[in-house]
Image (cartoon, grey):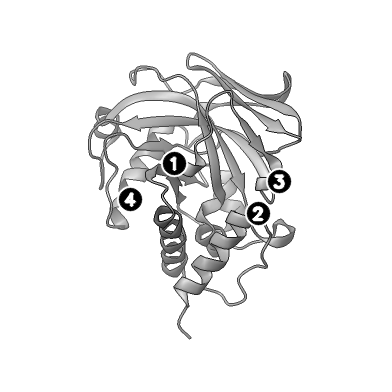
Amino acid sequence: MSTDIAALAARLDGAAFHATATPQLEDPISLEDAYAVQRASIQRRLDRGETRVGIKMGFTSRAKMVQMGVDDLIWGRLTSGMLVEDGGSIALPDYVHPRVEPEIAFLVGRPLAGRVTIPQALAAVDAVAPALEIIDSRYEDFRFSLTDVVADNSSSSGFVVGPWSRPDVDLSNLGLVLAFDGRPQAFGSSAAILGHPLRSLVAAARVIAEAGETLSPGDIVLAGGATAASALRPSSFVSLEMETLGRCGFHTDP
């Protein structure tokens, strides 16, 4: 039985747009079809006037790969409608199961796609920054399979980028603290992202090429969570302090 890509895309886009949970996909679909649903779902956002601004990487820890029974990363698309201003606010009713995780963001300065080395990937970067990704599964009861997640844009829903720094910063083991109203929620290191965040950028170049696309100048790549995600709470200030790179944050409205 063939997968109705357009119908699934409309369903997941509608769940995100209206912040209404939807059941898991009833019939198993292939990973290829899941990415096709993701692409079609994001195209609906672009048709409403949003623009493509980059991609996010997921399952960037070995523990998460083992948990989900996969041997490769997943990825999702970022649009202008997902960008939250550093220090800005989000309304929790706009999400279904909102969580946050600390990340590193790369700003692409030159076209990047295909199988590249770490030095080649780094040469395409103009800047790096601390970042927070707001993830949100649109599935009821926060239950989903691997292909459910991919079809749902790999749970991507929002992101905050802090101050940009030169790309030659040593990113291998930067300490970080994720806090709510100044109270630490998670401690971690950039080393949790595949052992080095640049490995995630190398993977991003590969997966984007496999999709027939290219990372272009101005695109942002979120390298993946450096800690487990924390559930968001109303009326909080969420902050990330990252060694060398600095700080970023956002407020959650009541």
Under circle 2, the secondary element is loop
| Residue type marked 1 | Ser
- The residue lying at 34 percent from left, 40 percent from top is 202
Label ID, residue 93: 3
- The residue lying at 69 percent from left, 49 percent from top is 97
Alpha-carbon span between mark 4 and mark 3: 32 Å
Where does residue 186 sit, x and y in percent of width and height? 68, 28
Q: Is residue 196 visible?
A: no
Q: Is residue 98 left or right of residue 74?
A: right
Under circle 4, the secondary element is helix
Verify CB contact (< 8 Å) between mark 1 and mark 4: no
Q: Earlier in the sequence, mark 2 or mark 1?
A: 2
Determine which residue is flagged by label 4. Answer: 208
Alpha-carbon span between mark 2 and mark 4: 28 Å
Verify CB contact (< 8 Å) between mark 3 and mark 2: yes
As drawn, 74 above or below 11: above
Determine which residue is flagged by label 1. Answer: 80
Alpha-carbon span between mark 3 and mark 1: 20 Å
Residue, far bottom: 1
Q: Is residue 79 left or right of residue 110?
A: right
